[in-house]
Image (cartoon, grey):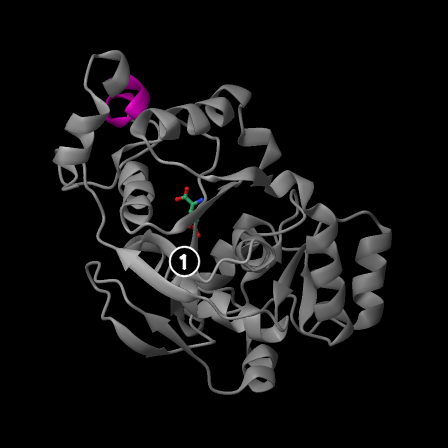
Amino acid sequence: MVITRFAPSPTGYLHLGHAFAALFAAAAGERLMLRIEDIDVGRCRAEFDTAIRDDLRWLGVGFAEPVLRQSQRFAAYRDALARLSARGLVYPCFCTRKDILDAASAPHNQAQGPDGPTYPGICRDLSDAERRTRIDAGKPYALRLDAAKAAAAVGDLWFDESGAGSNVEPGRIKVDPLWFGDVVLARKDAPASYHLAVVLDDAYQGVNLITRGCDLFAASHIQRVLQALLDLPVPAYRHHRLILDDTGKKFSKRDAAATLRTMRNSGITANEIKKRLGF
Ligand code: GLU
């Protein structure tokens, strides 16, 4: 059975891009797991949380119960980080945004990842004693993956892509484990980063096909590395084209006019939305 998932964050109302992903999975007759990505507790709001289910039902998209929430999963994230840490694959990073920007502007530190310059490695080689001193002094820290060590540990990896979003070639994709550099796995203010939480939760929910927009295609590379490091089952991927707003830009949660809630309140029907999206 194909088990896929829809994983929005309750930081705004669902928009047309979200509707496309959910309808796409539903139209294929797959089992759809819903996951509320509320790891960023401070930014999530109860009204958006309720609206996610409500707007999905209004669209006619069914999903399996119970719905998983990332805020219930903090112990699993901590456990995974402890396993990676015991293997020396993560290290504490005390840098502020400014430290990173200053270092990344030096000409020899210009490696580019999918989201901009990669981390220039400032905290990678601190001694254990120095780490201890800073931690004992109460300095906040994130945990970063040591990408070079991780790459050596996992060897060559691939993932299967069946989508055809812009810039996405379907087929067997060779993973670039260094593309994101030393990516953050636990933030200073949250017990896991998006990448870590997503791989653990997809495995936990038995997801075997990841459906999402092609803006997350690059993320599959680092997520595949984390699956290998954590011995998780490997799902297939299906990245769909992005649904753009009337000005050709990606939908923004701040753009109220593009939300399902606004369209619904203005009298647009679920069928009209399906038609507009090609269903
Ligand atoms: N939470 C992301 C979003 O709302 C989706 C993450 C994913 O599908 O991996 O777009």
Q: Tell me what residue is drawn at x 54 percent, y 81 percent.
A: 151
> Is residue 156 positioned above or below 236 on the image?
below
Q: To which quarter of the image does residue 174 belong? A: bottom left
Note whether residue 95 is visible: yes
How many discs appear? 1
Q: How far across and down, in percent of the image, does residue 18 sit?
A: 32, 39
Reading the image, the residue beneath label 1 is 210
Rendered location of residue 33, percent (x, y): 48, 46
Q: Which residues are magenta?
A: 256-262
Quadrant position of the N terminus in the picture? bottom left
Which residue is depicted at the point 56% across and 54% down?
99
Left or right, 91 with reference to 23: right
Q: Does the magenta portion include 195?
A: no
* Image coords of residue 14 (percent x, y): 36, 31
Measuring 36% from the left and 54% from the top, which residue is drawn there? 211
Quarter occupied by the C terminus: top left
Task: State whether residue 190 is above or below residue 180.
Answer: above
212, 78: nearer the viewer: 212
| SS type, badge 1 | strand
Horizontal side of 91 relative to 145 (left or right) equals right
Does mark 1 have its CB less than 8 Å from ligand 1? Answer: yes
Residue 92, horizontal then vertical, whole percent: 70, 61
Q: Residue at x 44, y 23 (%)?
A: 51
Magenta segment, prevailing SS (helix, strand or loop)? helix
Q: Quadrant of residue 16?
A: top left
In the rendered structure, does residue 258 fall within the stretch colored magenta?
yes
Which residue is more in the foreground, 116 or 154? 154
What's under tag 1, amino acid-wise? Answer: Ile
Task: Name the side, left or right, on which 41 lies relative to 211.
Answer: right
Judge whether 231 appears above or below 70 on screen.
Answer: below
Callout 1: 10 Å neighbours few (<14), some, many (20+)? many
